[in-house]
Image: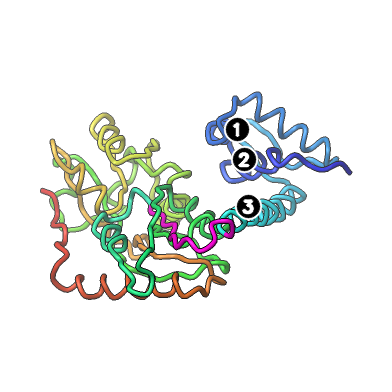
């Protein structure tokens, strides 16, 4: 069998994540017909059907599930080879590649970035920003040394150090009945318009919210998706809906007739986690993580101001 184009692997992996040609094409910066053609070419080369198309959407076939599982490993190892090779070419230059999600509390990010190591006086930190699931991939592949993510899934290739845990917050109009309570629950928002993180932003939290709602027998009347907190606030105001946000994002937009309340749903707690590669045992990374942990522990008792409820 001829070698498969790397771009076809990436397209299949993204489509398997989204199970929607339009969203997958957008992530890949392709037209939808262009993505369809790539998937058809890949299936033709393999001689099997990877995706079942129907009016209800896209589903992976069993051969498709097996292929995607191993395709992800192939892409992971290739990307890692590239980035580790580039790192080796830098020689003795001491650089920490650090990533964070835009949804992380800025206090935590600034504290971790303020780390200075006496053993590495020439250390420089290169910063990167992306959504949490992409940061996890970048740390796994060696693109990044350290990252701070929200609601990351467990991964055997990564070490996880939990830095903070707090409830998910509901953003709503001040006239909503739940705004008169100290905390809210999903049942308060049955048959209302919901505004959720796009799956490409927070796939774990997106699925947890919908799974928990299904378990409770709660259904939104319709769902809109957002990328930024400002988009969420606009959609809440326009549709008189409910947006689910992390604390920092909710506080930023809880004004002009909007308020926020913590969700009394322990299974929907938002975790802020520092991650490194499981096999990264270098002294630089170890010292950086230990120093960041000590800084956060020292300041958490008094220096960090906790956000009150917006009223």
Depth check, front residue: 7 or 42 = 7
Q: Quadrant of residue 208?
A: bottom left
Q: Residue at x 50, y 64 (%)?
A: 92
Label 2 Cα crowd, 10 Å radius (few <14 / some 14-19 / many 20+): many
Work out whether 202 lies above or below 57.
below
Please provide percent x and percent y for residue 48.
Answer: 82, 42
The answer to whether residue 97 is magenta is yes
Region of the chain picked out in magenta, as a range: 88-100
Dot label at residue 15 = 2
Question: Where in the figure is residue 99, as x and y percent of width and height?
Answer: 41, 54
Query: Helix or strand or loop: what does disc 3 sit on?
Result: helix
**What's the mark number on residue 82?**
3
Mark 1: few/some/many CA within 10 Å (<14, 14-19, 20+): many
Q: What's the residue at 47%, 44% (across, down)?
A: 199
Real-space CA distance between mark 3 and mark 1, rounded to the nearest whole angstrom: 29 Å
* Element class at badge 1: helix
Q: Position of residue 221 (x, y in %)?
A: 37, 37
Q: Nearer the viewer, mark 3 or mark 2?
A: 3
């Amino acid at each position: 069998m001829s070698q498969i184009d790397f771009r076809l692997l990436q397209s299949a992996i993204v489509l398997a994540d989204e199970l929607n040609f339009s969203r997958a094409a957008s992530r890949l910066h392709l037209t939808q017909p262009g993505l369809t053609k790539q998937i058809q070419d890949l299936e033709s080369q393999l001689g099997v059907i990877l995706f079942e198309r129907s009016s209800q959407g896209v589903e992976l076939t069993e051969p498709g599930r097996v292929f995607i599982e191993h395709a992800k490993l192939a892409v992971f190892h290739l990307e890692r080879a590239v980035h580790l090779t580039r790192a080796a070419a830098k020689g003795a230059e001491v650089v920490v590649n650090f990533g964070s999600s835009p949804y992380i509390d800025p206090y935590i990010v600034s504290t971790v970035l303020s780390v200075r190591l006496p053993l590495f006086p020439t250390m420089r930190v290169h910063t990167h920003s992306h959504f949490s699931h992409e940061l996890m991939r970048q740390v796994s592949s060696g693109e990044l040394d350290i990252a701070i993510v929200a609601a990351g899934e467990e991964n055997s290739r990564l070490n996880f150090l939990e830095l903070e845990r707090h409830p998910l917050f509901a953003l709503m109009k001040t006239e909503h009945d739940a705004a008169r309570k100290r905390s809210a629950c999903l049942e308060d928002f049955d048959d209302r318009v919901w505004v959720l993180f796009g799956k490409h932003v927070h796939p774990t939290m997106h699925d947890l919210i919908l799974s928990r709602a299904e378990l409770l027998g709660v259904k939104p009347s319709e769902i809109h998706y957002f990328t930024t907190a400002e988009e969420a606030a606009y959609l809440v105001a326009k549709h008189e809906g409910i947006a689910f946000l992390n604390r920092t994002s909710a506080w930023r937009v809880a004004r002009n007739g909007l308020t926020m309340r913590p969700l009394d749903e322990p299974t929907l707690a938002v975790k802020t986690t520092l991650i490194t590669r499981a096999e990264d045992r270098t002294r630089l990374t170890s010292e950086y993580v230990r120093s960041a942990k000590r800084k956060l522990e020292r300041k958490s008792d008094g220096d960090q101001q906790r956000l009150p409820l917006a009223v």
